[in-house]
Image (spheres, grey):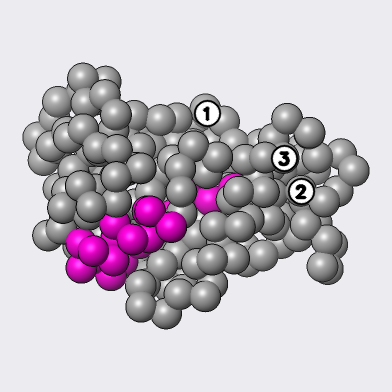
Amino acid sequence: MKVALIGASGQAGSRILDELVRRGHSVTAITRNPSKIVERDGLTSLAGDVADAQALGRILTGHDAVVSSVHFSASDPDKLIEAVRASGVKRYIVVGGAGSLEVAPGVRLIDSPQFPAEYKAEASAGAAFLDQLRTIDDLDWTFLSPSAVFTAGERTGTFRLGGDALLANDQGSSISFEDYAIALVDELETPRHVRGRFTVGY
C-alpha cells in the first residue's frame, strides 16, 4: 500500500513508520522536520503542517490510506479531517488515546479519580476527536486506543485486542509503541474496525 503517515517522527509515529517499512509498504513520512527521518527504501519524507489543511490535503492525495499520529492538543481535528477529505483518500487511521476507554460501564478512564491531571487536556481532546469521528460516514476511519501506559518497549507480537473497555492484566494496563504499531498495521492491511474504535494491550 501507499501510506501517508502524519507525525512520523514521534514516539508512536516512528514505530509505525518502522512497521510499515518492515512490511514493504510505500510510505510518505510527514513531519515538521523531515531531517529527523532516516532515509530508507520505499520511504519519502516531506515537511507538512497539520494546521494547513489545504497544503496537507495536497500531500495526502494519491495515497491508499492516511495514518495520523499527532498530539490532539497540538492539532485541530477539523483541519485533519478536512485535509483527508480534500485528498480523496477514504481510509483514515488515528492513533488514539486511552482516556476515553471505559474502566466500568459508562465510566471513562479520564473520569476516574486516579487519572493524572497533567494528561487531562490531551485525553479530553482525544475523546472529543473520537466523538467527532463517530459522526462521520464518508471516511473509512478507525481510532486505535492504546492501553493506559503507552511507552517504548519490545516488539513481541503478543497482545490482546478489545473494544471500548480498557484492557488490563495483573501487571496493570500497558502496551509498547512497538506492539501498538503491529496492531495498527494489521488493521491497515486487514480492516476489522472500520468506522469504529478498538484498543490493544497486554
Badge 3: few (under 14), some or many (20 or more) residues near its Cα, within 10 Å? Answer: some
Above or below residue 106? Residue 171 is above
Q: CA distance from mark 3 to mark 1?
A: 24 Å
Image quadrant holding the N terminus, namely bottom left
Distance from disc 2 to disc 3, alpha carbons, whole Å, reads 7 Å
Q: Earlier in the sequence, mark 3 or mark 1?
A: 3
Please identify the quarter of the rendering in which residue 31 is found.
Answer: top left
Where does label 1 land, which residue? 153
Tag 3's secondary structure?
helix
Choose the circle earlier in sequence order: 1 or 2. 2
Q: Please tell me which residue is depicted at 76% across the width and 48% down the height of the picture.
A: 110
Residue sitting at x 33%, y 61%: 82
- Real-space Cα distance between discs 1 and 2? 24 Å
What residue appears at the point 29 percent right and 51 percent down from the top-left corner?
Answer: 53
Magenta residues span 78-97
The spot of residue 21 in percent (x, y) is: 22, 41
Q: What's the residue type where badge 1 is placed?
A: Gly
Q: Does residue 40 show up magenta in the picture?
A: no
Rendered view: 141 above or below 27: below
Q: Element type at marker 2?
A: helix
- Camera-near label (3 vs 1) is 3
Residue matched to label 3? 120
Left or right of 61, for residue 85: right
Location of mark 2 (residue): 110
